[in-house]
Each structure stands twice: as C-alpha cells, then as structure tokens.
Image (cartoon, rainbow, N blue to C red):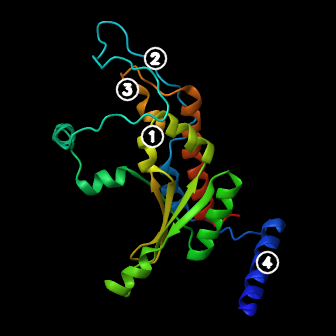
Amino acid sequence: MTRMKAMLAAALMIGTAMVQAGTGLAQEMDPETAKLNAKSFYKGDAPIPKRLPEQTGWFQIPTPPKEPAKTFAFSPPISAEAKMRFMQSMMYYNPFSLKQMINMMAAKKKAAKGLTFEEVVESLKVKGNEVNMRFVGVSTPWKVIREIYDPDYPRVEIYSFCDLETLARILEYVPEFIVFIPCRIAVMEDKNGDIWLVTLDWDVRWIDTLPHPDRISDDLRQRAMSVRERLEIMMEAAANGDF
C-alpha cells in the first residue's frame, strides 16, 4: 500500500509539472479529423443569435395561457397515452431512421491519433476543472460487459460533470430537468480503436422559436448556453490531448 501511494504521488507530481511547464500532451490533429470535429457545435461568424420575440398578430399560433412562475414545482404527469399520441404524430412526418435520430441528438469529437485513452480522460478532467465544470462521477460499464458478454468489447466510460449554480437555477425553474443532469461525456473506442468523445447535444437556442408565452429568463438562457459551450471546450481539449 505504501509503495502504491508513493507511485501515485510521483505520477501526480509529474502531471502537475507538465501542466505548469505548459508541455501537455497535445497532438497535432490531422485536417480530416479537425474538420469533422468542428461540426459538433454552432459557433458561426456572427454573434450568438438572440431569442426571437414572442409571436403576435393574426399568424400567432394558439398556445395554453401563461402560468404564474413557481419555483421547485413539478408539473402534473403527462399520461403515457398522450405522450404516445404526441410522439407518433411527430414521427409521422419524420424522414429519419432511429439511428439517424440518435446521431442527431449527439455531439462528438474524435481524438487525435497517438493519444491513449488515459490521456484523453486526463485532459477532459483538467479542462473541466478550468472551466468550472466539476467532475462528479464516472461509470465504467465495459468492465462488466467484458465479463458477461464479450471479452473483447471496446472500452467505454461515462464521465459526469456539473456546474452546481446553474444546476440549482435550472431545477428551480423546471425540476423535471433532473433527468438530464449531470452533464455526461462518454469516452469510447470504436471498432478501429479510435477514441471518441460524445455528449448529449442540447442547445437552448433551439427553443427560441417556441410560441408558448412561458419562456426562460435571459440569465438562465445564458447559463444554459455557457454549459453547452464549456462541454464543447472540454471535448475539444481532450480530443487534442491539450492540458
């Protein structure tokens, strides 16, 4: 145990020295991978779009009335039948396959060649700490899968991060959002041995055109956008092995 502690302490000192010296483990990203990774988040050349004004006039879409704001208030459950009807109505006009829909919900980056799984994970944690996304846990399902299903199953680990103040504000507004928290970034090997970083892709700007009068505050909107931007920064750093 003493020897193990000494080894861990030495490794920590070396890692700290590398970060302080600015050497890092950054790998040169090949142009094809860099182009692919750039697609995961809308940045654009123009300033971030502002929310659109509420609908007015004769073309206004009918919606339920605006409700008084209540903090930490769960909404009444929606029945399974209502959910089924709503989703099937949307799917009727959906041209995509299930695999394509899942792909649309994911943001991903491919790690540079030469980086190890451990180096990618370490970069992810270091950058998360820098941008105030606290590391709060990890799941390692591949270890059990290799025991019960396939001894050669690719390595996959899911890392959880959280901005606690933004979490607190969001749950005040809509406690049901807890199902999406904490923010998770998966690190996974594919069949070729390449390492990928993947997260749930949600961008609060998507809902700017919702016609319903109940809208999130400007402060909460900015916080939500900031979380998504920081996840992008973390994945980009990890894909480059950049400390």
Extreme residue toward the top, this view? 57
Q: Which numbered disc flags the more N-terminal residue, 2 or 3?
A: 2
The reply to whether residue 21 is in sight is yes
Quarter of the image containing the N terminus?
A: bottom right
Pointer 4 residue = 14
The disc labelled 1 sits on which kind of residue? Pro
Q: Secondary structure at mark 3?
A: loop
230 lies left or right of 81: right
| Disc 2 from disc 3: Cα separation | 10 Å
Image coords of residue 204 (percent x, y): 47, 36
Image coords of residue 117 (percent x, y): 56, 75
| Mark sitting on residue 175 | 1
Pointer 3 residue = 210
20 lies left or right of 214: right
Quarter of the image containing the C terminus?
A: bottom right
The disc labelled 3 sits on which kind of residue? Leu
Pointer 2 residue = 53
Q: Which numbered disc flags the more N-terminal residue, 2 or 4?
A: 4
| Disc 4 from disc 1: Cα separation | 43 Å
The disc labelled 2 sits on which kind of residue? Pro
| Disc 4 from disc 3: Cα separation | 51 Å
Image coords of residue 153 (percent x, y): 38, 81
73 lies left or right of 43: left
The disc labelled 4 sits on which kind of residue? Ile
The reply to whether residue 150 is in sight is no
Q: Which numbered disc flags the more N-terminal residue, 2 or 1?
A: 2
Tell me which residue sits at (52%, 38%) in the image.
170
Q: Which numbered disc flags the more N-terminal residue, 3 or 1?
A: 1
